[in-house]
Amino acid sequence: SENDLPKGSTSPVSDFLSLGIPEPVYQVVEVKSDGTISNKSINRRQLLKSSGLRPRDIRSVDPSLWLTNSMPSLLVREHAILLNLGSLRAIVMQECVLIFNYNRRGGKAFVDTLLPRLHPENTNGGPLIPFVLEVVEAALLSRIQRLEQRMMELEPRVELTSRAGALRQMLLDLLEDTEEIRRICILGKPCTLNRINNTVECLVPSEKEIAE
């Protein structure tokens, strides 16, 4: 808090105001523990106060730092958990989760995974899991599912590339065998039947032609 700052120093929020820079305002989607969803605009000061986080903690989920904070992370703090899983960035608190850039694929996939888990009828009579754990588990599960889907999309390409590589190696090995090339060339050349001695005559390429 500002009261904990050393004498003579100012909080980052105060720095914004003193420099005439507008305080950052985040557009987030809030999902509460009962499954209700709402859109919210929240400034940095409100976010720090409601989550109990420090300004530097927010950097890992700040949408304005998307390119510089691309490393996936899961930060556990006293009153909140910060999730940075690629296109999913969120702050998990005791009774709600705030999702940044909800319209990105990761945010939507996460909510689709989370909401069914918040309804008691989907627990199959088992013990209820704390909301924070439900959120973290849903976030990891949605990320795994997206990675699996991506792997399924790439697998045919990888297999095709592997086959192409094997074919290329086979052709390279073949080019080192002059006799094999001669045989293939013979099979590909037109042949004629000699009716006098009943033999098949094919035009055999020379060594120079094979080399070319």
Image (cartoon, helix red, strand yellow):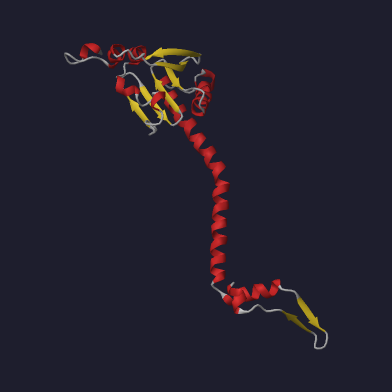
Looking at this rendering, what residue extends furthest in the left direction? 7
Between residues 202 and 41, which one lies in front from this camera angle?
Answer: 202
Name the image quarter holding the C terminus: bottom right
Between residues 97 and 10, which one lies in front from this camera angle?
Answer: 10
Q: Is residue 126 above or below residue 49?
A: below
Image x and y of residue 2, in percent: 24, 12
Image x and y of residue 14, in percent: 28, 12
Name which residue lies at 35% across and 13% down: 50
Q: What is the number of callouts on the image?
A: 0
Looking at this rendering, what residue extends furthest in the bottom direction? 197
Image x and y of residue 186, in percent: 68, 75
Image x and y of residue 76, in percent: 33, 25
Name which residue lies at 80% across and 85% down: 198
Name which residue lies at 29% across and 14% down: 19
Q: Is residue 130 visible?
A: no
Q: Quadrant of residue 80?
A: top left
Name which residue lies at 33% across and 18% down: 79
Q: Is residue 151 visible?
A: yes
Q: Quadrant of residue 179?
A: bottom right
Between residues 76 and 209, which one lies in front from this camera angle?
Answer: 209
Name the image quarter holding the N terminus: top left
